[in-house]
Image (cartoon, rainbow, N blue to C red):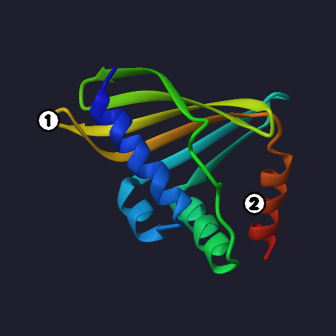
Amino acid sequence: MNQALVDSMRTYLQAGLAMDVDQLDQLYDPEFENVRVDESGQTITLTKAQFMARFRALREQGQSVGESIDDITFPATTDFGDHAAIIMRRVENDVPALYTFIWRMDEGQPTTILREITFDKDISYLLKMVRSAKDA
């Protein structure tokens, strides 16, 4: 288990809870993409700009992305060259969700999040939201 990666994930998750968009902006790589897949096979890829716009909108509305990270576990990490992956598991509304984060590494230390791959129950709401934003 790569403890530096686990620690960096906890820093990232705390920034999300605090809606610290400046820190999130620094943690997301300029080439960041969030790839989401749901149980029916629907997929969507969000860019850093789209992801950050969502965080900013939530913050402006006084909302947050969660109340706690106590339910989160990290079952595995793996390092490969200048990158590393960490698997994150959490339970939201009694439904387990799995995430894979790919980090850029520099001399064994995580620097920025390059990819977040999310397996969700249903992303229909997200597809509708992105389509509405494109139509606006």
Q: Residue 22's image quarter?
A: bottom left
Left or right: 123 in relation to 79 = right
Q: Tell me the amino acid under the disc marked 1.
A: Glu
Q: Residue at x 79, y 36 (%)?
A: 42
Element type where label 2 sits in the image: helix
Residue on which disc 2 sits: 130
Residue on which disc 1 sits: 107
Left or right: 42 in relation to 80 = right
Q: Residue furthest bottom?
A: 60
Q: Residue 58's image quarter?
A: bottom right
Instruction: Indicate the quadrant containing the C terminus: top left, top right, bottom left or bottom right.
Output: bottom right
Q: Residue at x 37, y 34 (%)?
A: 6
Q: Nearer the viewer, mark 1 or mark 2?
A: 1
Q: Residue at x 84, y 52 (%)?
A: 125
Q: Which mark is residue 64?
A: none
Tell me the distance, in whole angstroms, between the alpha carbons under discs 1 and 2.
37 Å
In the image, residue 81 above or below residue 112: above
User: Picture coordinates of residue 85 (x, y %)?
Assistant: 41, 28
User: Picture coordinates of residue 54 (x, y %)?
Assistant: 64, 65
Left or right: 60 in relation to 82 = right
Left or right: 22 in relation to 4 = right
Using a 10 Å C-alpha cutoff, classify the residue at mark 2 as few (fewer than 14 neighbours), some (14 to 19) or many (20 or more).
Answer: some
First reached walking from the N terminus: tag 1 or tag 2 = 1
Instruction: Indicate the quadrant containing the N terminus: top left, top right, bottom left or bottom right.
Output: top left
Element type where label 1 sits in the image: loop
Viewer-proximal residue, 21 or 36?
A: 21
User: Picture coordinates of residue 108 (x, y %)?
Assistant: 19, 32
